[in-house]
Image: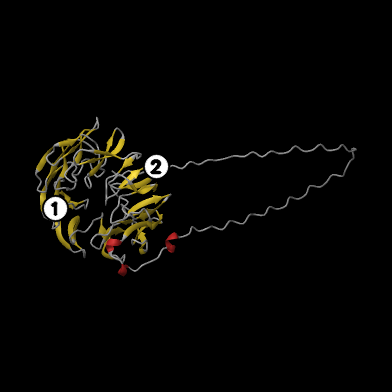
C-alpha cells in the first residue's frame, strides 16, 4: 500500500513591545500673544518605486546535458520540474527536457507520454530522443512487452501498426505473466495473451487482480478466490476485503508462494495462505520478498519468514517490503532510512519521504524537493525536482 508521510513544520511568531519614554516637563513662560502662523503646505509624498521582481533561479539550467546517443533508454529516469516531466540519466544529466504533462517509464525503448493533463490529452510513445514514434491518439497509458502492447481495442507493435482488434477493450495495460485483463462486449472481465488471443473468456463481474505466482485473485459475490492461468478456480471464493498493504484492488497477490488475506474485515482477522488455500499464519502484513514479509504484531512492525518465525526490528515505527535487498524503515523521530535483511540500517534515517529501490536507485525527498539516491544513500540525482522516479510506487513512505 502506498503510504505517504507528511512532515509538519511548526511556525513560531514572536512579538516585541516598544516602550515610549514620557516627555520631560516644559518650563513655564510669560503669556504672550504671537501672530497666528499660517499652516504649512504638506509636502507631497513620494511614491516608493516598485521593488524589482526577483526571478527564481532555474536550477535545471545548472544540470549537465548529455546526448541521447550516449545513453540507453533503460537508464532513463523520470523527473518533474515546473509541472512538466522529463528524463535524466543515472548521473542526473538531462537527456529529455521536461515538457510532458504525463509520463511513464521507458520499456523496450519507448515511453508513454502525454502533452496534456490527464483527462484532456492523448497518449503516444516517444523514443529516448524525446520524439514521438507513435503519435498521441490513445486515451490511457500502456507499456510494451515483447514488441507489442494492448491499448484500447487494439494490439499494436512498436511502430504503432495495428496487429489485431480486441473483442472489447483494455483499460489497464498491466501485463502480468504474459496476460492482460480486458473487458468483453458483455461487460465482464477476461484475459488476453500478448498476441490478442482470448485465454480466459470474459466471465467475472467483480474486481480482478493481475497474475502473480501463476494465480490471480477474483471477486465473486463479494468474496475473494483465486484462478490459474487457464481460468480454473483453484482456491474457492471465501476471503474478504481490502488488504492493508495492497492498494491495487480488494485482493492480495501471491508472492513467493504466499498471499495475505482477510478472514474477517470487521474484526481485522488476517491470514497468510499458501497456494492450496491453507492458512500458515494469522497475521496482517505485506508480500513476501526474499523470504521475508512485513507484518504488524501488537501494533509493532516486524518481519515474518516463510517458516513462521517473527523477526523484530526495535526502534522502528514502520517497515516496507524488501526490494533489491533493502526495505524502507520509518524511525520514531519521523525520518526515513533503509535496512538490509540483517535488519540493520545501511542508509541512516534522514529523508522526509522515499520509495523502494528499482534499477539500483530510489526516489527520496529532502525538505520539499525530490531526487534519486543510490544504495549508499547518496543523491546521484540532485533533490531539485517536484517529483522523481516512479511516483506510483506500490511502497512509499
Colour mode of the rendering: secondary structure
In this view, the residue in front, 191 or 336, is 336
* Side (left or right) of 81 relative to 290: right
Q: Is residue 160 above or below residue 338?
A: below
Badge 1: how crowded within 10 Å, few (<14), some, or many (20+)? many
Q: Which mark is residue 250?
A: none
Residue most extreme to the top: 267
**Residue 140 found in image quarter:** bottom left
**Residue 313 found in image quarter:** top left
Q: Position of residue 303 (x, y in %)?
A: 26, 40
Badge 2: how crowded within 10 Å, few (<14), some, or many (20+)? some
Instruction: Find numbered disc 1 in the image and state the secondary structure of the residue it sits on.
Output: strand
User: To which residue does mark 1 refer?
Assistant: 192
**Residue 79 found in image quarter:** bottom left
Q: Quarter of the image containing the C terminus? A: top left
Q: Is residue 155 above or below residue 232?
A: below
Check contact, mark 1 vs mark 2: CB within 8 A: no
Residue in view at x 21 percent, y 34 percent: 282
Q: Position of residue 186 (x, y in %)?
A: 13, 46
Q: Is residue 285 above or below residue 119?
A: above
Residue in view at x 24 percent, y 59 percent: 107
Q: Quarter of the image containing the N terminus? A: top left
User: To which residue does mark 2 refer?
Assistant: 334
Q: Position of residue 19 (x, y in %)?
A: 69, 38
In this view, the residue in front, 361 or 192, is 361
Which of the two labelled residues, at mark 1 and mark 2, occupies the earlier sequence position? 1
Residue in view at x 62 percent, y 57 percent: 49
Residue 271 seen in render: yes
In this view, the residue in front, 368 or 291, is 291
Residue 237 seen in render: no
Kindly report the distance in space between the C-alpha atoms of the residues bearing marks 1 and 2. 44 Å
Residue in view at x 10 percent, y 42 percent: 233
Amino acid at each position: 500500500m502506498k503510504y505517504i508521510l507528511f512532515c509538519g513544520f511548526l511556525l513560531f511568531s514572536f512579538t516585541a513591545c516598544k516602550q515610549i519614554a514620557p516627555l520631560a516637563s516644559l518650563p513655564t513662560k510669560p503669556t504672550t500673544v504671537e501672530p497666528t502662523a499660517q499652516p504649512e503646505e504638506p509636502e507631497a509624498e513620494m511614491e516608493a518605486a516598485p521593488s524589482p521582481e526577483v526571478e527564481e533561479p532555474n536550477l535545471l539550467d545548472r544540470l549537465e546535458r548529455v546526448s541521447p546517443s550516449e545513453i540507453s533508454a533503460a537508464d532513463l529516469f523520470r523527473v518533474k520540474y515546473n509541472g512538466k516531466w522529463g528524463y535524466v540519466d543515472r548521473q542526473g544529466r538531462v537527456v529529455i527536457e521536461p515538457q510532458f504533462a504525463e509520463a511513464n517509464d521507458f520499456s523496450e525503448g519507448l515511453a508513454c507520454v502525454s502533452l496534456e493533463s490527464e483527462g484532456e490529452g492523448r497518449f503516444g510513445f516517444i523514443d529516448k530522443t524525446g520524439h514521438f514514434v507513435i503519435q498521441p491518439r490513445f486515451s490511457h497509458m500502456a507499456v510494451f512487452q515483447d514488441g507489442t502492447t494492448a491499448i484500447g481495442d487494439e494490439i499494436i507493435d512498436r511502430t504503432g501498426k495495428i496487429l489485431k482488434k480486441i473483442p472489447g477493450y483494455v483499460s489497464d495495460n498491466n501485463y502480468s505473466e504474459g496476460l492482460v485483463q480486458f473487458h468483453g462486449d458483455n461487460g465482464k472481465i477476461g484475459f488476453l495473451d500478448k498476441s490478442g488471443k482470448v485465454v480466459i473468456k470474459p466471465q467475472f463481474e467483480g474486481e480482478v487482480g493481475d497474475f502473480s505466482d501463476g494465480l490471480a485473485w477474483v471477486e465473486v459475490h463479494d468474496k475473494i478466490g483465486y484462478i490459474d492461468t487457464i481460468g480454473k478456480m483453484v482456491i474457492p471464493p471465501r476471503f474478504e476485503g481490502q488488504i492493508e498493504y495492497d492498494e491495487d484492488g480488494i485482493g492480495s497477490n501471491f508472492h513467493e508462494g504466499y498471499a495475505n488475506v482477510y478472514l474477517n474485515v470487521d474484526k481485522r482477522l488476517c491470514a497468510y495462505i499458501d497456494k492450496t488455500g491453507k492458512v500458515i499464519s494469522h497475521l496482517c502484513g505485506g508480500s513476501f520478498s526474499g523470504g521475508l514479509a512485513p507484518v504488524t504484531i501488537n501494533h509493532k512492525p516486524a518481519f515474518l519468514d516463510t517458516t513462521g518465525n517473527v523477526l523484530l526490528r526495535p526502534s522502528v515505527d514502520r517497515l516496507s517490503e524488501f526490494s533489491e535487498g533493502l526495505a524502507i524503515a520509518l524511525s520514531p523521530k519521523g525520518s526515513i532510512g533503509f535496512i538490509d535483511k540483517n535488519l540493520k540500517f545501511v542508509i541512516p534515517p534522514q529523508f522526509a519521504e522515499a520509495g523502494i529501490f528499482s534499477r539500483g536507485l530510489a526516489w527520496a525527498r529532502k525538505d520539499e524537493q525530490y531526487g534519486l539516491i543510490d544504495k549508499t544513500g547518496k543523491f546521484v540525482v540532485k533533490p531539485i525536482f517536484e517529483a522523481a522516479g516512479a511516483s506510483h510506487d506500490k511502497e512509499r513512505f
